[in-house]
Image: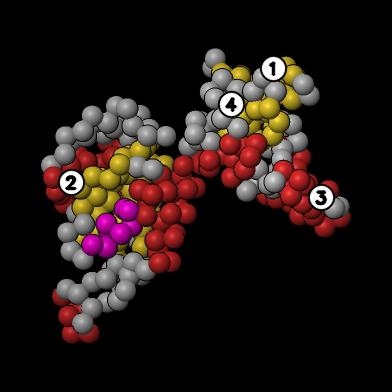
Amino acid sequence: MKTIIFYRSSYRGNTLKIAESMKDALSAELVSIDSNPSIDLSDYDLIGFGSAINFAAHDIRLQRFVSGQYLKGKNVFVFSTRCRPFLGAYHKHLKKIIEAKGGIIVGEFSCQGFDRTGPWVLMDGYNKARPNERDMFKARLFSEKLRWKLHPLALIYKNPVTRCSEGITMRRKGSDIIAGNKVVFLNTSTCINCGKCIKICPMHIFSLKDTALPMDEKNCIQCRLCADNCPTSSIYIHESFLNGLRIALRESFSNKLQNSYKAEDNHH
């Protein structure tokens, strides 16, 4: 998913810290609007805009920058750093601009930031040491959830099954063939047979046939190592409470999962 993040961080570097955390989680390009960038956004799948909150809204320069972008049909998220402990409606104005430009709001994030202006001068600043490590962790977590939400196979489990091959159900998404039943899905059309999923899966659910296939998805523990390390984003894990409950019950009443995990020793 090709992602770009535009930001303005003009005071204490609060917003830049959050933007950098998001950049790492999304493998995104990070661009300051202070450089007056002129970038064609047509090839980007996800676009982020963020700044500090000034006078109950995003930085006016960021608002003007967003007003000049063509965002029709684009997935967009907004983020901010703020003085107040509660977000309130501070994102409302920027979201209205994005929606007016045709953008689709897919998420928003905000956290507190250090402020030493106005009345806070008397106490040498408010929100000292913010954003902190916890704030940056939350920003990364928000970004990872966003990336997972927008994965090209996120809704594939809803597609009808077209056929079965070697005991694996197959579905179509456009011209692509997707292998997987209810939990683990692999796009056989984009898979390059690198074998990373086979090597990294602690439960050994993948087998190499003509392509890698999720042969034992019942053993999946939703760790997402396979999906996170797939170079072509060809793997998707359908995470759900029911899947988590299934795993917990199997761990409680059966030693099959533990035996499968221990089997990793035999591969070294």
Kind of residue at disc 3: Asn
Q: Residue at x 37, y 55 (%)?
A: 21
In this rendering, position of residue 111 left or right of residue 16: right
| Predominant secondary structure, magenta span | helix
Tell me the element at label 2: helix
Image quadrant where one finds the N terminus: top left
Which residue in the protein does label 2 denote?
33
Which residue in the protein does label 1 denote?
162
Kind of residue at disc 2: Ile
Query: Does the magenta-highlighted stretch encompass residue 15?
Result: yes
Q: Earlier in the sequence, mark 1 or mark 2?
A: 2
Q: Is residue 246 visible?
A: no
The crowd level at tag 1 (other Cα within 10 Å; few <14, some 14-19, many 20+) is few
Which residue in the protein does label 3 denote?
259
Q: CA–CA distance between discs 2 and 4? A: 40 Å
| Residue 41 percent coordinates (x, y) | 27, 31
Q: Are marks 1 and 2 in contact (CB under 8 Å)?
A: no
Check the image and report above or below for 59 versus 95. Answer: below
Tell me the element at label 4: loop
Tell me the element at label 3: helix
Query: Does the magenta-highlighted stretch encompass residue 190?
Result: no
**Of 210 and 65, which appears nearest the observer?**
210
Q: CA–CA distance between discs 1 and 2? A: 48 Å
Q: Residue at x 74, y 19 (%)?
A: 165
Single out the mark in the foreground, 4 or 1. 4
Single out the mark in the foreground, 3 or 2. 3
Q: Earlier in the sequence, mark 4 or mark 3?
A: 4
Q: CA–CA distance between discs 4 and 3? A: 27 Å
